[in-house]
Amino acid sequence: MDIQTIGVVGSGTMGSGIAQVAAQSGFNVLLYDINLKILQKAIGQIGHYVRRSAEKGRITEEEAEAALDRIATTTDLLDFKRCQFVIEAAPERIDLKKDLFHQLVTATPDDTILASNTSTLSITQIGGGTGRPGKVVGMHFFNPAPLLPLVEVVAGAQTDPAVVDTTFELAKQLGKRPIRVKDVPGFIVNRVARPFYLETLRLLEEGVADYRTLDKLIREGGGFPMGPFELMDLIGLDINYAASVSVYEAYFNDPRYRPSLLQQRKVQAGQLGRKSGRGWYIYDKDKSS
Amino acid sequence: MSDVLIIGDGTLAEEMAALVGEAGYESAAYLYSVDEDEAISGLENYLEEFPGPYNLIIESIVGDRDEKRQALKMVGRHKRPGALILTAAHNASATEIGAWQGVGAAEIVGWAALPPIGNVVEVMAGLRTNPDSLAGARRFLEALDREPVIINDTVGGVLPRIVASLVNGAAFALMEGAATAEDIDKGMKLGTNYPYGPLEWADKIGLDQIVGILDALGKVHGSDRYRVCPLLRQLVLARHFGERTGRGFYTYGRAGS
């Protein structure tokens, strides 16, 4: 399949990151958002990152400008008729995504592949009822998309294997290192990583050691680059907690994935990590007060 | 005559024996061979030949709690009065081991680490452990150039409990066909920067050791949370322990033998 133009739905952090990667890999990009102001802001951000790459000498100025010239924007999904491949990166709400995919099926030619960057929702559910479930696939990038190499290519229950293959090849053309994953809750990374947080939270709740000691043992004893509490502070306790709740519920309350009450209290207290000045650790006394 | 006796059933015990040797201690080590079914009678013969008495005993039998219990009872007769026993907390807390018949509670100190042994080693005192024993354990680990970090007594310690749970979750994902072993490990290394993929790490630690940790956690916590993945248990039953036996989640040079 010859992919020339990639449509990206949603111009938040993930959407604009994916648009940047695609443009810098030589594809034409059509970036959509419902809100023109957010779209303009995203274009400004992408321009900033790409030009900074040029300033740092990672790419030439000509390459930077050519990549930016390949990105067009729209607030009308009907313009996606010229896309051979679409990557949806809208907020993680199933009703919203189902609605977008219905619109995309109408707007695009029959053989256009419709990928979702969802990290928590089922590809099978997103594709079901679209009338084109064979063309619906998961393409899960990690934040920040321009920097992190991993992409989970997710096959829904009805996804055509050839579509999975094309998506896998596209991920490689985008300079990524893809893996193939079935449509299970949390896919691989978000699912398999859960005990790293949940068991450590349990150890804290049981009073085995304080959070600093637990981080130290895991970092220096195990060779992990960061301890779980430091990492939760970086990710955001709200985001990390929501991921645990999502996986737990999707597995019908399997006790292996039971979220932590202690973490829920931190979220309720607004101690969300670095972004709020305080999570497990204190970063900014002014912001956290 | 040897000062320190090391007994164990996995890579962790081998690494510990090497550390003790490098630190200049006169040591004796009885390390279970992977081909051996009757490890306990082997230990008995070894202790007849090298009876001690030892000034310090390090135990790391993680795969089988019955063997651990028998072995600790046996080596207890080969130590000097008051000599310390550093016992792997991976599959029993120091308090529980101290309550086992024939094992002196006052001299029991739990330790936990995983291969490759990092700069810190977890140390825990049982409820009946003598404070002098804990101090002795700290001094000994410092002599091995490792930082002892004291935690409260708990089965599985910190690192073994977390890594065994990660491995179990990855094994479930593999069993369910969510991805290949290679893709699971690749995903975790690229997506989370773990030092090893969970399945390749399990092969280094020993799948028997992982199951030993999980079974003990399940028993003590009474929770389905530590239910062992059936695929993982099958591999252990087949003695596919990982790198030590040439086969685990992956196949290594020795496989087919």
Image (tube, coloured by chain):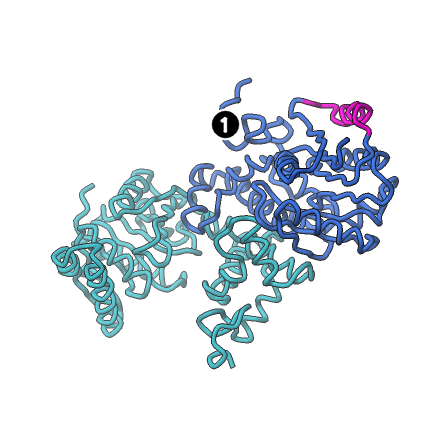
Chain colours: A cyan, B blue
According to the picture, the residue beneath numbered tag 1 turns out to be B251
Q: Residue at x 50, y 27 (%)?
A: B251
In the picture, measured across the screen, residue A84 lies left or right of residue B26, that is left
Point out the image quarter for the N terminus of chain A. Answer: top left
Q: Secondary structure at mark 1?
A: loop
Query: Disc 1 marks which amino acid?
Result: Thr
The percent coordinates of residue B255 (x first, y second) are 52, 22
The percent coordinates of residue A2 (x first, y second) are 18, 43
In the picture, measured across the screen, residue A173 lies left or right of residue B257, that is left
Q: Which residues are magenta?
A: B36-51
Q: Is residue A278 on the magenta stretch?
A: no
Tell me: residue B189, above or below residue A282: above
In the picture, measured across the screen, residue B228 lies left or right of residue B105, that is left
Q: Residue at x 88, y 39 (%)?
A: B102
Q: Main secondary structure of the magenta part?
A: helix
Frontmost residue, B67 versus A107: B67
